[in-house]
Image (cartoon, coloured by chain):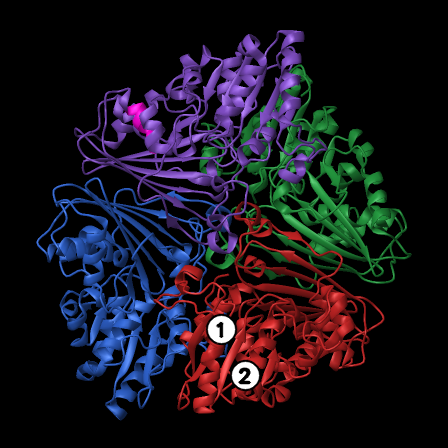
Chain colours: A purple, B red, C blue, D green
């Protein structure tokens, strides 16, 4: 492991009671260069361990106004780098960022910020409206944010100070389909079918009917049959390639806490052998620390849970390319990828503080 | 299987949205002699399948006042038997029963009623106050209710028209300790230690922090360290034997939906071999359809889930009698036992409509 | 519930140590008209409860030769009906049946037999060879066996004495696709995509790497990427309709013990609204006790586990018909359906001994 | 995080196909000072990812004789430190160590070795015989090994070059009882009752009936009713304090993959308030990174899984001290603690490479 950077970068995590924020706090505890300066929540003074029992220690949440002042003072005093992660719900993140930006004025430029909500993911306002049934919350701020999927757009992230971390399903959908789409393998006239199963942490920290244990335990069921809003992020990525296929994505809830397993059945535009498909994906992701193309077989969920890694399996059959993607919704599909973006924007090693080996359970 | 009784006994289930009520509705669907006349809920007109998705069909809830009238009319018209199960929360059951009693007047005597709440379980008001922190809700009505654990008091149930179904843990605690206590095997001067693990359905139908899937999945934790109120039912049973040992019962939440596994470590008053212990328990429960004393080994939870059976394993060691009890909290520890009581009070075969073989999953 | 038939039908279950046989034994214990005469296993004298811990009681396995003699004597003596279930592995079932047939001679005709293996499922020897990589084990006996999916071929079952119970996935695949195919809704020129997740009981009673708990717990992974042999049963059903579409079926292993959830994405040959699709499926399965077409939403696995019911959800979208099927692999996908076939062949009520409400856990 | 040591310490892991070895390999991948030099297995040339799918990369196992030579050459050439972890089964570890020692001769002294088996845990040969039913495998080598529970014997570990890592249950048993025993709180004349539930990874990497998913899923059952051999390690620790109470430890198998939850009910020799008990344990473990005494409430399993932390909850009641311990059997109860020992023996920061925050799932 590499030596840590000189001075630690102070880091604030907004929305500290959320699931993704909890995961970020865990990652920050082991990060060589970032240092938690404040876990920010409207409910201030709460012990972090009460919110996230796997986090030991005595730290407590601080109020947003307290955090804003501290960020301003830090930048004033040091001029040095600082980082902010926005782990707030959709629609609350943009207002929080606007408030912070207003408070900091031009010093806001010194700040590296990653938003984990959907507020800055979609460039096209119509696409946002269609997916979220609401106006974009900060249209003028939108252009500052780079879409944060490093393996599909690393260079723009290196140059940026703001990133919009992708949705969990959206990460899997793009890793599954974009390489084949880029390579011209797919028939955009036939439907692209996606089936995914997600763990219960995707339902958030608050108890809900969908994540009630007697209901979720040993159960499996589809939802969002009319379409899931994470499809819009894939549509955006395909539009950039000039493609607009019909997407049929059926998400399912599964009986595990972490992880997403996606199975795509993509119509091929030409004959393709499994080996060739693997070679194309392996080439596309050559040298990547966090995307792995399997030389054989199928990925499994537990092999990636607890890691920032996405594992991809491929099989071509009867005119279809079957792509299997397994990732941890809280890491590569959430907090891990957000941290990967921050590392890139801060000029740190991209893999700093990010686990490659999984914990083996979901 | 025996032939069904002549005319079906109309049956009303109050508190139809609850977990135990859902299980009762399932059992009634397969009962040869009882027939669901109304699933009663303050929220009337709700499809049962929306409340309990494993129940197919189109039946809907009816309002309490609607049910009360129907019960009265049935008794008026037929004079024949009818049954009511009260699946309401503690403290709500007694008022509901008082209201029904008042409405029916002396015709109430024609009704067989089983209360699944704690409202009528404890005879001693002080014991009730200590366990539930509240006054008994219906002290004058209390005497009508027989404690409903058939294997430890069948004859009084046969003669009764009202039964208070035991608590889930309380059933396991008594099956574990009462036979040894009756046989004078135990030292009441040393503490009796009980450890139990329960499934999440014990937390009820409403989403809660305790039963939030990301929290409960793959987890185990103790609760109620100051004492669980189900201990009071064991104290009551032991008091009837003239015993008042210190009880140390530590309940735990486990990552399954159904079932309770109890491990008791009971101080022996004399030397005792495992074989002798098994013989005593086997003798005590000889001929019982729903309590099984294992000839060897330990019971397992999944072998009883879905059945109305409690399985008991025994091991004597170093001055302690280790008793292991596995049962389904929703059946032998809840709705199944309540139905067993109703069968007895109605003069039906005790096992009517009650599964002996388990579904093999919890 | 209906009154039981006059004299119980003696019933033998071969391959008693298997998972499906265990489930049959459980169902038989509650059947009003069938009575277990022998649980048959090459390893004779083993307590059933040691093989299937959820089955209480003292019954033990008997040897095949012992069973054969008993069957012959019963038929000789009574001339009355008798039933045999073959719960043996693929390739072992046909030889066992041939031996039994040879032993009984023309009296074999008195016997109702259901085979739960794949040995008699496929009429076309080439299809069998392609799916199982082996010659059909009893080609001349094949014609006696009717394919045992009652909802798609009840009349031929009523007239038969031999049935081949479908595979677990095969049941789900056919319930999903056949109604739409029959109605001419589907485009046989585009691929029909199926994605299914199965519980670990599908891996059988013997410990295996695929079903090792530390591996399977909280995990999800695809397998059989080259094609699963249960596809052949759907191909057979579609061939009878004159259809031969490309089938892309990807099975997955999920972290529950029972149940299969299937998601089909079927290419539509014409515009179709979700409501119309529901009406077509509801009409196709009108009056069925064990197939339920949901009026809205998606089926869930735990609602059918422990029941013999398959629940079907439908959604039409963008040229695709999404069909969701949930069933218990051990019941509607296995032992339950086998018993349903036996009921039909014996002239008993089709639903005798078969649960409609689920146990709520998988 | 602290700066890494100058040159990485080459490290060999024997028994690489085992569960604990897999966890060690995962920890070594993130360790700042230790570097995997060889994953050693009798079956050489196997990809580590085939053995432990959560470990990405292309490394393969090497043969023991190959490793022995490499260790010898390294020590010869550098004279510098090296580390060996023995992750072999009981009874295989001592012979492997004897062979390695013989090969290296007096250069063996340069090597830091941690044995994860039971071969060197018990100093008393009689105790070993009673617990393992076999002679100690290397009686003369026994004295070199220090018992490896740092929080209860750190100084001897600092001075040692060989450590015997404790058993998983044994770690929990000692953390629960030793502080109270040391403080003279407990009555050694009454039985000390322990109840623990363990995850399925404790059953090892090979499929087994005990860990077959359809059996283990949603299940709970006791085993080793005659006594579990890990009790001997607690007896050894108590003997050092001059205590020999009767121990009643009942282990249970639970439906999760990782983790142990222990509940002890210990007889108090004097009156004690919960607060006082907490103060005594908190004092005993003050400053420890990996043992945490909760100021209130009960520990939960998922809060420690994925971390090297043990969490302890305390409650005094009616003459009993209830102690609750949660730890990850693969980390604080296995590979993590072994690495903690190696860090100490090598003079590295004790917490190097060891996670304090958990992954939140078991």
Q: Residues within 10 Å of mark 2 (few under 14, many from 20)?
A: many
| Residue B30: numbered disc | none
Asked whether, in this view, residue C342 is left or right of residue B357, the answer is: left
* CA separation in Å, label 2 and label 1: 12 Å
Q: Secondary structure at mark 1?
A: helix
Write the start and end of the magenta stretch as one range: A231-238
Q: Residue at x 59, y 31 (%)?
A: A16
Q: What residue is pinned by disc 2?
A: B104
Q: Pinpoint residue D313: horizontal percent, then vertical percent.
A: 74, 47
Callout 2: residue from which chain?
A: B
- For the N terminus of chain B, the image quarter is bottom left
Residue C317 in view of the camera = yes
Q: Taken as a whole, is the magenta stretch helix, strand or loop?
A: helix
Residue C272 or residue A59, whichever sits in front: C272
Q: What residue is pinned by disc 1?
A: B65
Q: Residues within 10 Å of mark 1 (few under 14, many from 20)?
A: some
Q: Pinpoint residue B138: horizontal percent, then vertical percent.
A: 67, 75
Query: Please, is residue B144 above or below residue C130 in the view?
Result: below
């Amino acid at each position: 492991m590499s030596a840590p950077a000189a001075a630690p970068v102070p880091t604030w995590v907004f929305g500290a009671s959320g699931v993704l924020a909890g995961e970020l706090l865990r990652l920050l505890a082991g990060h060589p260069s970032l240092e938690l300066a404040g876990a920010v929540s409207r409910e201030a003074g709460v012990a972090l361990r009460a919110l996230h029992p796997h986090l030991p220690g005595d730290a407590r949440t601080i109020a947003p106004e307290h955090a804003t002042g501290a960020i301003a003072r830090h930048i004033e005093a040091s001029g040095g780098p600082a980082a902010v992660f926005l782990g707030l719900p959709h629609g609350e993140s943009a207002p929080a960022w606007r408030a912070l930006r207003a408070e900091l004025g031009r010093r806001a430029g010194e700040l590296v910020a990653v938003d984990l909500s959907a507020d800055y993911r979609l460039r096209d306002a119509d696409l946002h409206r269609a997916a979220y049934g609401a106006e974009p919350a900060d249209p003028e701020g939108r252009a500052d944010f780079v879409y944060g999927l490093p393996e599909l757009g690393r260079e723009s992230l290196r140059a940026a100070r703001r990133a919009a971390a992708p949705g969990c399903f959206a990460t899997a959908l793009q890793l599954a389909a974009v390489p084949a789409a880029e390579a011209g393998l797919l028939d955009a006239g036939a439907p692209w079918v996606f089936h995914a199963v997600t763990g219960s942490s995707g339902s958030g920290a608050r108890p809900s009917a969908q994540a009630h244990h007697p209901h979720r335990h040993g159960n499996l069921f589809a939802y969002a049959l009319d379409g899931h809003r994470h499809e819009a992020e894939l549509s955006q990525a395909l539009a950039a390639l000039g493609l607009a296929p019909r997407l049929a994505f059926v998400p399912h809830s599964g009986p595990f806490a972490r992880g997403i397993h996606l199975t795509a059945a993509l119509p091929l535009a030409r004959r393709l052998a499994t080996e060739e498909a693997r070679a194309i994906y392996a080439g596309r992701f050559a040298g990547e620390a966090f995307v792995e193309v399997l030389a054989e077989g199928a990925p499994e969920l537990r092999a990636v849970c607890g890691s920032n890694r996405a594992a991809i399996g491929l099989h071509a059959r009867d005119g279809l390319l079957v792509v299997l993607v397994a990732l941890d919704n809280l890491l590569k599909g959430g907090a891990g990828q957000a941290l990967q973006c921050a590392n890139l924007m801060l000029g740190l090693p991209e893999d700093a503080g990010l686990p490659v080996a999984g914990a083996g359970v979901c």
